[in-house]
Image: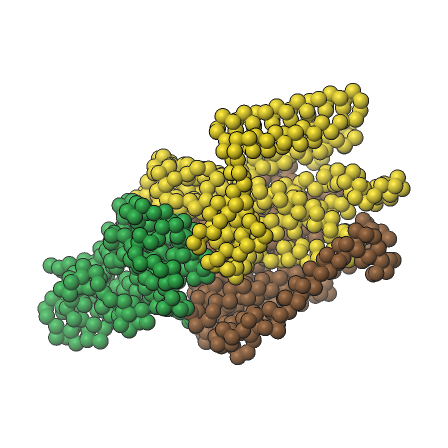
Amino acid sequence: MISFWRGCTAMALAAAVLSGCTGGGGSATDAGGVAKIKARGYLSCSGSQGIPGLSRPDEKGVWRGFDSDVCRAFAAAILGDAQKVRFVPLNAAQRLPALQTGEIDVLSRTSTLTFTRDMAVRFVAVTLYDSDAVLVRKSLGVKGPADLGGKTVCMQGGGSLVENALDELEEAEKIKLERVYFDSTITARDTYLAGRCDLYVTDGLAARSQLATVVKNPQEHDLLFIGKTIEPNGVAIPRGDDRMFDIVRWTANLLIWAEANGITSANVDQQLASGSSEIKRVLGADDAYGRALGLDQKWAYNVIKQVGNYGEIWDRNLGANSPIKAERRLNALQANGGLQFPLPWD
Amino acid sequence: MAPNIGPRGAPVREPVNVRAIAIQAGAVTAALCAVGLVVLTTLGNLTARGIPIGFDFLSGRAGFTISESLISYSPNDSNLWAILAGVGNTVAASLLVIVISTVTGTLLGIARLSTNPLVSALARVWVETARNTPLLLLLLFIYTIWWSLPADSANQLVPGVYASMRGLAVPWFDAAWSPGTAVLLVALVIALLAVAATAATIVGRRTGRRPPYLRLAAGGAAIIVMLAFLATGGTLDRPRQVGTSLQGGATLTPETATLLLGLVFYTTGFIAEIVRSGINAVPRGQWEAARALGLSSGKILRLIILPQMMRVIVPPMTSQYINVVKNSTLALAIGYSDLMVVMGTVINKTSRAVEGTAIIIAAYLLINLTLSAMMNLYNRRVMIRER
Amino acid sequence: MNAVALADPVPDARAAPVAKRRSWLKLLFGTPLNALLTIIFGMAIARMSVWLVDWAIINAAFFPAEPASCQAAQGACWSFVIAKHSQILFGIYPPEERWRPALVCLLLIGLLIYSVRPASWGPRLFGLWVAAIVAVFVLMLGGVPGLTFVPTALWGGLPITLILTVVAIGAAFPLAIMLALARRSKLPAVSALSVLFIETTRALPLLSILFIASIMLPLLLPEALLPDKFFRALLALLLFAAAYMAEVVRGGLQALPKGQSEAAEALGLSYWQRQRLIILPQAITIVIPALTNTIIVMIKNTSLVLVVGLFDLVSSGKAALADPSWSSPAAETYLFIAAIYFILCFGFGRFADSLERRRKVSR
């Protein structure tokens, strides 16, 4: 008798899994990313392995940096609260699979937009224009790229884009570099600092920020920009999600637009009340933009109020109000000689 | 088991049979459904996110560098070739560690049983350190030790051997052989060894005592190779210091050296325990009988104990060897390009995570199943000797 | 890293049955070989000890726990470990809430020590553990009145190691027993499925399993069934441990004479009654030493979650080292973390050994 019931239980279990088969397989396709994020109550965003100024958890576990704040802007737009972000630390090799599989909703982690990558995930906007740079010990007496021949270079493995810059350099200067790869750019940096390598190569801004914050005796190192390539570091989402694309593109645009129009987190209330008609409309005087994006009427207001505009994010993390004090250069507004400009709303 | 008892628990009664079928059907259905759920969800997600699937990327250009590769590889080779280079590196590192650790582990296992308390205590410290410390920490720790070595000027340990943060450089033979000479030499050595082995077997069968022809042939082969090396103008290449780096000789990078050192240290500790319990498994009477025959401790160990021990230790050694292959994936933490690292790069470059994961699984299954098949073959040979 | 099913490690002395009666002097210098070994190793030990004491104690910096004391020191920089102990032990858990993971560690370690006494074994201990695990998750996660919510992404350090170890091994053990029984089942389909799972899991590196669990799983499972990253790593460790422990348990099952099962069957006990009352208690007792080895390996395996972005001890140690005001004493930090693992693993090993010895005496 007991055995009969046991058989029944087994069959019932099997039936339950079977129903899971038919139901679960189908449901994965229809729920869009935005609906999932809203249902979940937080945005899942990429973190790096700890690059100061871009994305790194502070001692309290709060992620700080330009890339992290860009994530917060999306959370403010979608969920109305910039704090509703969970950061997932990823190394270079994990970040694209993590986006493809849905482990993260948005990738904002010094990732260069390339053709190959854009075929795998969807790059939406360029948030930072960067170039490649090397840190080199002053004691080596390196004056320019030509002196780098035969040197050992510590770098992140996993097919990062700086590799192209090194290839370019080797070809142009007819030199050969000895490369040592690590799973994270942080390990590569520490190993360089310990003296294993003559050079440490990474993105220009990352090199600057690390020189300004983590490198122990910064005066002993030189920062050398290499390669002519501009690295457009972008924000990416999984492919095939138009709604998410809209929100990410226009939130990224909002940050630059707000800076160009002088809207800051400090004066956004005042701008909403007494700005130009376009400013009022975007900030939520009517719900045209919000409705079109499937967002709250005040989505743009929330972003600027809670995170600030592009310039504020820059100053806080990389610019004047940070230890890094990097200049805007290519990332300045077009009006100031940079490459950033807002797309028109209407 | 005597045949008249019959197979135990044979389904004689009808209800048992029904139940057995029901349970099995349930288990298979559950497993199939779990697999079905995963496959359907994956396919659904792949379509929804527009991720293509297929293995065409394997023929595409790899486009990344592998810092040290056993197989000749350049970024212009295909992804498949890059993966094979990764497999080569994993297999090479694992084999090297397996061979070295087997020797050191056996010695350590014997040292553990030494009558000298100093020796056995030191051996114990080694074993306990290896058993109770995570390999990852061990590797990170060893890697930091390189950092305390001089960075710029290489440290000459003994003449010709340099150790610095840039690696360990030793003098190495620089042979000036043409490919033809090399092939000829290899063929000669193999032929010599084969002839010696056959002769030894024939003589051994006839007289009941196997003459040491193989050893003589090996010595002869070594002399022939040496003479050929000198005759063709081969030299001993000593490492030289050029600027901050070392050139010439053979250089082991700190990354490879750390991986090998760490894995060998760790595996040695485990193998020592296997060997110790293997020696202990040989009945005490064997020792006493051998002593009564007047054999020395070393001879007892070599002629009586170790051969018998082999039967006990081959199965645990097999799983230890497989562990070495698996543990070599920790190369990730210290920058040695093993299969996992290369696959990570390939996945990042091509964004073929699903296929990449499948390749990782298949490759490790293949390597480990081959390894355990070889060990099982060896196990059977050891067992046959039992009378 | 991985389990090795050692044959029962009998205390040595077999190789040297007369050893105990000899005097120390004779042991150390009795034969020329022994004398030579003693001199070589004695000198090596002496030199190493002097250097080690110099480095780790005499020339080391302890207090004040400030960067300056480190720069001045010739030897080890323990002041870094002293200053950063909270960050290393608790990772990025919010500092004002760190009493919670500290309490969790005390709770788990306390209960582990309490569980060591065979006198306390029984259903009550099981209930205590269930309550403790619930308390651990409530304390760590929060979200109840009085405790702010701390997502698993902020968990770090020693609590992660302890929770992963205790929960993964605790949950893996019953699963391992089921797998071992299934593998030895007379039903071919059941045993084939079990073999497939066990052999595949054992042939794969844990790193690849963790990679699949942390990065690939969102693609493989519907969102509704998907646990968060911490629990996925936990699941990976659990399945991995189950496959290894299943093989150890199977060893014990095979070592039992068939008569045991047959006699129990003759008494009219059902399959599950036979396993529960007769077979498993004996089989598990036989394999306690091998099980100990497997569990120690699993404790060490928790260090691998570092590569999937969990802030375990090693990871938070690395994060602490990134502080630019210190001179990055990496070796000291790794030694500190290694010492924690060593205490956990060695302590557990000793406990299991004493258990084994008591069992042998009692027979």
Q: Quadrant of residue B15?
A: top right
- Residue shown at the point (34%, 37%) measured from the top left: B60
Q: Which of the two residues, B174 or C292, is positioned nearer the viewer here?
A: B174
* Whole-percent x, y for residue C268 in the image: 73, 44
Residue C266 at x, y percent in the picture: 76, 41
Which quarter of the image is occupied by the C terminus of chain C? bottom right
Q: Is residue C1 visible?
A: no
Which residue is found at the position 57% from the left and 41% from the top? B95
- Asked which quadrant contains residue A7, the reply is top right
Residue sticking out furthest to the right: B292
Q: Is residue B329 above or below residue A188?
A: above
Pick the front one: B234 or C253: B234
The chain coloured yellow is: B
- Residue appearing at x 33%, y 40% in the figure: B52
Left or right: A216 as drawn, with respect to C21: left
Residue at the far bottom in the pictured view: C64
In the figure, what tint was chain C given? Answer: brown
Does C135 appear above or below B291?
A: below
Would residue A274 appear left or right of C56 to someone viewing this image? left
Q: Position of residue B75 (x, y in %)?
A: 37, 41
Instruction: Name the residue rendered at 22%, 76% in the picture.
Output: A266
B160 on left or right of A104: right
- Say whether residue A274 is visible: yes
Residue A195 percent coordinates (x, y)? 45, 60
Quadrant assignment, res A218: bottom left
Q: How many marks?
A: 0
- Chain A: what color? green
Colour logic = by chain
Closer to us: B49 or B333? B333
